[in-house]
Amino acid sequence: MEKYSRYGMMAARILISMVFLLNAFGVIDQSVPAHEMAARGAPAGMVPLLMMSGRAIQLLAGIGLMLGVFPRLSAVALLAFLIPATFIAHSFWLATGTPTFMGQLINFSKNTAMCGGLLFVAATAAQPAMVRLGHTK
């Protein structure tokens, strides 16, 4: 793998993982998505568990993606989290004609762009690792 390609791929994974890590550590407020989840039919008692499960996935897979430890698996795990989260938390079509429409549309678009980046990582077999696990020759 060419040197610039290697560093470019590592930088791209780091940049993609940042939003997931910020969510996992609670830097980005998750109160609105929690309320939207409950409003869309999730049992109120399950919302905290679902939020913590989402944070755990984002933390583990975000670190894996960033460091290149099982990056393809990490990308798939983040996709499995991001797709339903996008449709639940950023359903812009339900906000048509309201002041929140544009914000929801922008966030939906941002999430679809992140899905594209994660799909690219998941589909690229040769992912350089920042950290090596196990014995190497």
Image (cartoon, rainbow, N blue to C red):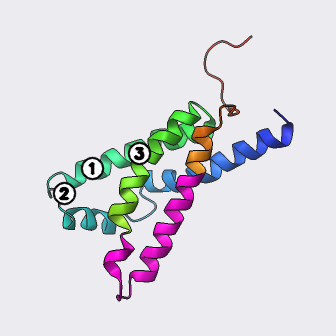
Label 1, on which residue? 50
Q: Nearer the viewer, residue 118 or 28?
A: 118
Q: Which residue is labeled 3 in the image?
A: 80
Q: Is residue 39 left or right of residue 13?
A: left
Quarter of the view holding residue 84: bottom left
Image coordinates for residue 50, horizontal then vertical, percent: 27, 49
Q: What's the magenta region?
A: 91-116
| Label 3 residue SS | helix
Secondary structure of the residue carrying tag 2 is: loop
**Inter-mark Cα distance, 3 to 1:** 14 Å
Q: Quadrant of the N terminus?
A: top right
Q: Residue at x 32, y 69 (%)?
A: 32
Identified at 25% across, 62% down, the residue is 37
Residue 115 is inside the magenta segment: yes
Q: Amino acid at mark 3?
A: Ala
First of labels 3, 1 by sequence position: 1
What label sits on residue 42 in the rendered view?
2
From the top left corner, tell me how far across and down residue 91 is, in percent: 35, 70
Camera-side residue: 127 or 56? Answer: 127
Tell me where residue 110 appears, x and y as whole percent.
53, 65
Q: Are marks 3 and 2 in contact (CB under 8 Å)?
A: no
Residue type beneath disc 1: Leu
Q: Indicate the position of residue 72 as horizontal and vertical percent values.
A: 56, 35
